[in-house]
């Protein structure tokens, strides 16, 4: 059923005199495919940072599966089931693709604190990581150092790391950002293959992706929720058009 | 009555020491706040400049003011050369590389001065006008120390005014606060840094020369006082002239007093205090939260 | 929408582990033939240069000290100029116990030295590792300076500037005596301790814990975002690093039968940092390479031409900072890759 996974109540954030987010009431259900769009500087990434715990809110609360997690750190929220990707890749560039995902999987299953056995003996971690890479069609790149990959495939590794955490809620911050349009379909494919039950919130500017992927769309302007509805509703909303879609149009 | 005079002379001694520390460290504070570059070799510039000043006076019979000017200019010039050829390459590098580079420079300075001048300490001959004692009304005190305190006050006011009132000062403040914003406003950050670095190194030279009588001047100078310069800068807050002034005075006075009353290991309190301050305010007492 | 997923299941689970990347990761910790070389060399040194065993002992102690720093710096990315604090803690633990005739058995003394180092590492780590950058650097410096001043203040117990000479160290296992004129026992004893500690460090580095440290060093924010308790890991790493530095300090006190304030000196901390970077940090054997090169050069040059040595070292550091940030081993890697280009594993 539509179990409520993530919820915010009157979530606000100021930076000195600048109000980045005001009174955001937001709900994300299990299986959600929810897109968050809006002009630059609307507060979308700040919102993700607040959800993920990278920033504390000035006011309001964040609830995960009914539990108030506002005071919890990033790492604690990950353990409770939230994972995120970053707008600009944050990968372990000097390590191989496989090792990047292994780190994530090892953290999740609690293998990471072990000091006395080599990584190589944790076949379970390696095997699961390889499986994940296969699903994302990254398997051929598994032995390569991340810094050697083209940007589009690095973006995929970013997603792989997040999925390795088997989250209940996945926050994707512009997953196609910086990816040349010739490669962006691989991002689209990857997102489409994500497990159904995960609640996904995706910030995106690429309207192709939004219309193909999202079941619901929220428009954020000036730190406040401006409109919400199905992609079709939003597309046909004249106010939204004026504020945002009017210039870019749909590809 | 005697106790009050003793107290005053200790305070004045400490302020003089602190002033020397300030004059050397102010350049380091501004450049580190501006560029985030860990320049451990700053003390080496102070040492180099001090040598120019003292040798100009002792061997070439320059006047005091002329020697100071020469020290300032010579060190500033050298710093520009080093900045363009070496420092510039590591602006984007990690801290570790910067630490390594500047430690290397310290060793080069130390060895070069030992080879060129010799390992012995260089005495500073004070000009006669600044020697002797001055009458402060309620007591007599060393003229030179009062001179130092006055000079320090003058410098901090002058620099503060420059920061607040001149265009270049505004540019520096803007860049310390938010570098990317400053660049997008058209500020030539690279050139700004070269100018600031030159000025800061010149100031260090002045500090090295002025303080030669108090801190001594030998090839070990650059390492001996490094920790103190760093404490003054980090406790004061990177990029804050007022901060490094207060921190230097505090540090100088504390050190002076402790060396007097607890010569064996008394300076432990300086380290304890520094640790406490930095834990309470990691960016220093007057440090700014840069974007 | 998920129709494509079905075809992927065709690779059987075992087959995944046969993939190149997986095999490389599984094999990563296996011993390579050249890893035996340092130990063979150390053994050969014993027979080939019996007059230089004192130098050899110092070399191995320095390697151990540099290894401890590598754990903190090379693997966890903690930049510290105060590592001699732990070295000194270990040295003075051994020194005080021996000098005041409380305890002279060497191996247990080393355990105590490790504990002393670990205690100070834990206490300072819990407090300092909230900070980063210059602040952290300053705090590590001040902690070390503070300990040095404390040792100076307590000169009734520590001998102050003069230190504690002629330490009485009991024979190892009751049989092998420490003789200042014939440092055979010192050399072999140090070699054994170094070996044991190295095995521990190597295991740690290849473990999942070690991998997470690398992750912290490579991308701190990402580690937070995968749920790693970063600060806890850093504190544990720092504490272990301090414990091993304490062992190195204890060894130093035992083999020299002497301890003084130089154990806590900025000079010592800076030198070990230089040695590690020279050899190549984050590379396990960087400590070996750096110590051998630095101490050998220093032994032959510094004594005769101290100023030239200082100048040369300074120039070397500048060059390394600009062109060879990964030290000797890093340069070696670059050369190796030129001749054998292959994928990273």
Image (spheres, coloured by chain):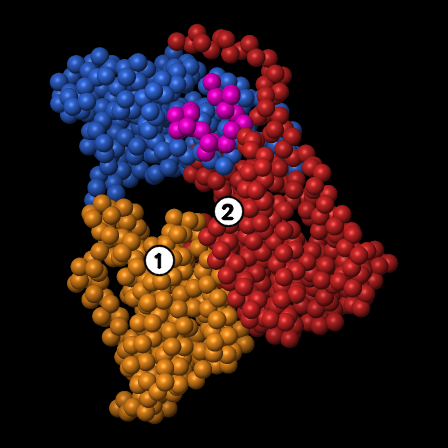
Residue positioned 36% across, 85% down in the render? B60
Report the disc number at residue B84: 1
User: Which of these two is toward me, C167 or C266?
Assistant: C266
Q: Which chain carries label 2?
A: C
A22 left or right, relative to B111: left
Give the quarter of the figure containing the N terminus of chain B: bottom left
Q: Is residue C251 above or below residue B255?
A: above
User: Which of these two is toward me, B46 or A221?
Assistant: B46
Which tint was used for chain B? orange
Mark 1, residues whose alpha carbon is within 10 Å: few (<14), some, or many (≥20)?
A: few
Q: Mark 1 lies on which chain?
A: B
**Chain blue in the figure, letter:** A
Name of the residue lying farthest toward the front: C339
Q: Where is residue B225 in the image (x, y as percent from the top left)?
A: 45, 70
Residue positioned 43% across, 62% down in the render? B40
Name of the residue lying farthest toward the right: C175
The reply to whether residue A135 is visible in this rendering is yes
Q: Is residue A119 above or below residue C236?
A: above
Report the disc number at residue C49: none
Q: Most prominent secondary structure in the magenta stretch?
A: helix
**Chain red in the figure, letter:** C
């Amino acid at each position: 059923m539509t179990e409520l996974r993530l919820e915010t109540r009157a979530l606000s954030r100021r930076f000195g005199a600048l109000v980045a987010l005001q009174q955001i009431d937001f709900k994300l259900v299990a299986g959600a495919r929810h897109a968050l769009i809006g002009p630059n500087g609307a507060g979308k990434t700040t919102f993700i940072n607040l959800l993920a715990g990278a920033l504390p809110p000035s006011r309001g609360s964040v609830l995960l599966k009914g539990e108030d997690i506002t005071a919890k750190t990033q790492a604690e929220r990950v353990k409770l089931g939230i994972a995120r990707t970053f707008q600009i890749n944050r990968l372990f560039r000097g390590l191989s693709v496989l090792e990047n995902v292994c780190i994530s999987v090892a953290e999740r299953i609690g293998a990471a604190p072990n000091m006395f056995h080599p990584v190589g003996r944790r076949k379970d971690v390696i095997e699961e990581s390889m499986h994940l890479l296969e699903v994302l069609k990254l398997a051929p790149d598994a032995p390569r150092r991340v810094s050697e990959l083209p940007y589009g495939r690095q973006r995929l590794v970013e997603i792989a790391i997040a999925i390795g955490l088997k989250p209940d809620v996945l926050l994707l911050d512009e997953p196609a950002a910086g990816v040349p349009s010739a490669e962006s379909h691989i991002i689209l494919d990857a997102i489409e293959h994500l497990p159904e039950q995960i609640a996904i919130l995706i910030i995106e500017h690429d309207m192709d992706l939004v219309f193909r992927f999202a079941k619901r769309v929220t428009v954020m302007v000036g730190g406040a929720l401006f409109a919400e509805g199905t992609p079709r509703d939003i597309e046909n909303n004249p106010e939204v058009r004026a504020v945002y879609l009017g210039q870019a149009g749909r590809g | 009555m005697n106790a009050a005079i003793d107290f005053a002379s200790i305070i004045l001694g400490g302020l003089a020491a602190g002033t020397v520390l300030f004059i050397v460290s102010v350049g380091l504070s501004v450049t580190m706040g501006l560029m985030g570059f860990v320049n451990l070799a700053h003390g080496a510039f102070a040492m180099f400049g001090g040598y120019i000043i003292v040798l100009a006076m002792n061997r070439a019979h320059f006047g005091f003011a002329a020697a100071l000017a020469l020290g300032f200019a010579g060190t500033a010039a050298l710093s520009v050369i080093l900045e363009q050829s070496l420092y510039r390459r590591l602006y984007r590098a990690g801290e570790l590389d910067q630490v390594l580079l500047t430690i290397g420079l310290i060793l080069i300075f130390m060895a070069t001065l030992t080879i060129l001048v010799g390992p012995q300490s260089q005495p500073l001959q004070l000009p006669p006008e600044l020697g002797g004692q001055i009458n402060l009304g309620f007591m007599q005190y060393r003229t030179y120390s009062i001179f130092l305190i006055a000079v320090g006050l003058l410098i901090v006011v002058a620099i503060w005014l420059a920061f607040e009132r001149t265009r270049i000062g505004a540019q520096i403040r803007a860049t310390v606060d938010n570098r990317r914003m400053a660049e997008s406003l058209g500020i030539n950050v690279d050139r700004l840094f070269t100018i600031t670095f030159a000025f800061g190194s010149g100031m260090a030279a002045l500090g090295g020369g002025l303080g030669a009588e108090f801190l001594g001047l030998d090839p070990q100078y650059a390492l001996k006082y490094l920790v103190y310069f760093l404490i003054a800068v980090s406790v004061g807050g990177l990029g804050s002239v007022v901060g490094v002034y207060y921190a230097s005075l505090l540090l100088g006075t504390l050190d002076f007093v402790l060396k007097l009353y607890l010569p064996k290991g008394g300076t432990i309190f300086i380290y304890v205090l520094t640790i406490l301050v930095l834990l309470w305010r990691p960016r220093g007492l007057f440090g700014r939260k840069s974007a | 929408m998920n129709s494509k997923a079905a075809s992927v299941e065709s690779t059987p689970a075992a087959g995944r582990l046969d993939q190149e990347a997986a095999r490389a990761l599984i094999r990563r910790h296996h011993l390579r033939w050249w890893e035996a070389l340092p130990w063979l060399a150390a053994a050969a040194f014993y027979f080939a240069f019996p007059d230089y065993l004192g130098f050899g002992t110092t070399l191995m102690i320095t390697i151990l000290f540099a290894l401890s720093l590598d754990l903190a710096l090379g693997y966890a990315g903690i930049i510290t100029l105060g590592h001699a604090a732990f070295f000194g803690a270990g040295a003075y633990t051994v020194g005080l116990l021996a000098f005041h005739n409380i305890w002279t058995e060497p191996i247990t003394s080393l355990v105590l030295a490790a504990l002393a180092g670990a205690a100070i590492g834990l206490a300072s780590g819990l407090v300092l590792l909230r900070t980063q950058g210059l602040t952290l650097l300053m705090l590590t410096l001040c902690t070390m300076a503070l300990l040095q001043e404390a040792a100076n203040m307590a000169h009734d117990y520590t001998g102050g500037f003069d230190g504690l000479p002629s330490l009485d160290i009991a024979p190892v296992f009751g049989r092998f005596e420490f003789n200042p004129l014939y440092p055979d026992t010192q050399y072999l004893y140090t070699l054994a301790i170094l070996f044991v500690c190295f095995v521990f460090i190597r295991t740690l580095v290849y473990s999942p814990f070690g991998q997470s440290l690398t992750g912290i060093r490579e991308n701190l924010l990402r580690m937070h975002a995968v749920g790693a308790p970063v600060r806890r890991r850093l504190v544990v790493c720092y504490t272990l690093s301090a414990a091993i530095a304490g062992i190195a300090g204890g060894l130093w006190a035992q083999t020299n039968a002497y301890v003084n304030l130089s154990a806590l000196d900025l000079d010592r901390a800076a030198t070990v940092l230089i040695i590690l970077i020279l050899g190549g940090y984050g590379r396990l054997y960087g400590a070996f390479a750096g110590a051998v090169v630095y101490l050998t050069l220093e032994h032959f040059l510094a004594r005769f031409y101290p100023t030239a040595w200082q100048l040369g070292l300074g120039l070397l550091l500048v060059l390394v900072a600009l062109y060879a940030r990964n030290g000797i081993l890093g340069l070696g890697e670059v050369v190796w890759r030129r001749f054998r280009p292959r994928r990273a594993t």
